[in-house]
Image (spheres, rainbow, N blue to C red):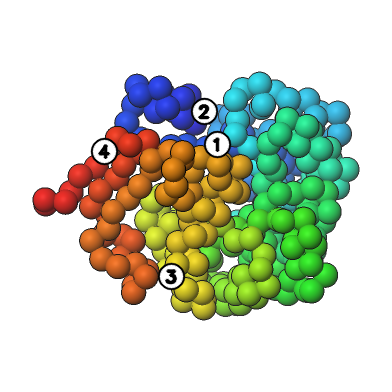
Amino acid sequence: HIIRLRDKIAAGKLSGPRIFAPGPIITAPGGHPAGTIYKGNRHIVENAVRQIADVNTAREEVRRLVEGGVDCIKAIYSDINPMDTTQKVPKLSLDVLEALADETHRHNLRLMVHTGTPQESMDAIRAGADSIEHGILPGANSFDFNDDLIKMMLDKGTYFVPTLAIAWAYKDTYPAVFTGLKRTFKKLHGAGVNIAAGTDSGTPGVVIGKGLHKELEIMVEAGISPMEAIIAGTRNAADNVAKAGELGTIESGKLADVIAVSGDPLKDIRNTREIKLVIRDGEILVNRINT
């Protein structure tokens, strides 16, 4: 269980990265991923997903997850089936999503919502989503985040996590999605929308760890500066999980989480891969400086 793993690392019983976890994903009965990538695997469905059909159950489940120690809540608001884009799957009703957002905010946590189209993103933001994950997926009928949607994101301070790395992994199968997502990402960034780096790591084609480096590289390829990409993966990522007060930048009073690389990532973003030193909370976890 990722919450137990997080707690063991935090207590010093295991050596590992700092983890912030939403716990089980909330979706509609039969929705993604319960009725798609996890279909037929009862153990994963029971442990990794919560299938919600009504408002009262939505609030109860958020309270249970909060009691279990989650750091945020993640919900699926999309009828796109990534296993077969010609088939739709059930998705949460808007009133259930609104209840999830309200209950999540009552407990001072943030709601991250997986969406696959601009319209789903607009609905999710109206309902109270703090962060939009993906925004455009294979099967989307539009890649255009229009001015009204962008204004809404700016007004509400909504974060956008484009997961460009997963689109890149499937670019040969869905080339229009990859190019459309890069274009949308650049448009949102240029408009001033909050951008945080995320990868959907664990999805086939995106390896945990390496996926983030690829994400930053594609961000730069799409037209932002290396420093802006680094900010998306540090300061903004911390802010998106409500931890900007203690993480994300090197400042007095914050936790000493630092990496050192052998090259200059401002000249070539690929140099973020050349990690020589990893410090977490002031403690050296990895030291390859002399190797």
**Spatial CA span between label 2 and label 3:** 33 Å
Q: Secondary structure at mark 3?
A: helix
- In the rendered image, residue 171, in percent from the top left (x then y), is placed at 51, 72
Q: Which residue is mark 1?
A: 21
**Spatial CA span between label 4 and label 3:** 26 Å
Give me the disc on residue 284: 4
The residue lying at 66 percent from left, 21 percent from top is: 67
**Mark 4 or mark 3: which comes first in sequence?**
3
Labelled pair 2, 3 in contact (Cβ < 8 Å): no
Given the image, on which type of amino acid does mark 3 rest?
Pro
Labelled pair 1, 3 in contact (Cβ < 8 Å): no
Given the image, on which type of amino acid does mark 2 rest?
Ile
**Spatial CA span between label 2 and label 1:** 7 Å
**Mark 2 or mark 4: which comes first in sequence?**
2
Q: Secondary structure at mark 4?
A: strand
Give me the disc on residue 226: 3
In the shown orientation, is residue 184 left or right of residue 245? right
Q: Is residue 221 visible?
A: yes
Give me the disc on residue 249: none
Labelled pair 4, 1 in contact (Cβ < 8 Å): no
**Spatial CA span between label 2 and label 4:** 23 Å
Given the image, on which type of amino acid does mark 4 rest?
Ile
Q: Which residue is mark 2?
A: 3
**Mark 2 or mark 1: which comes first in sequence?**
2
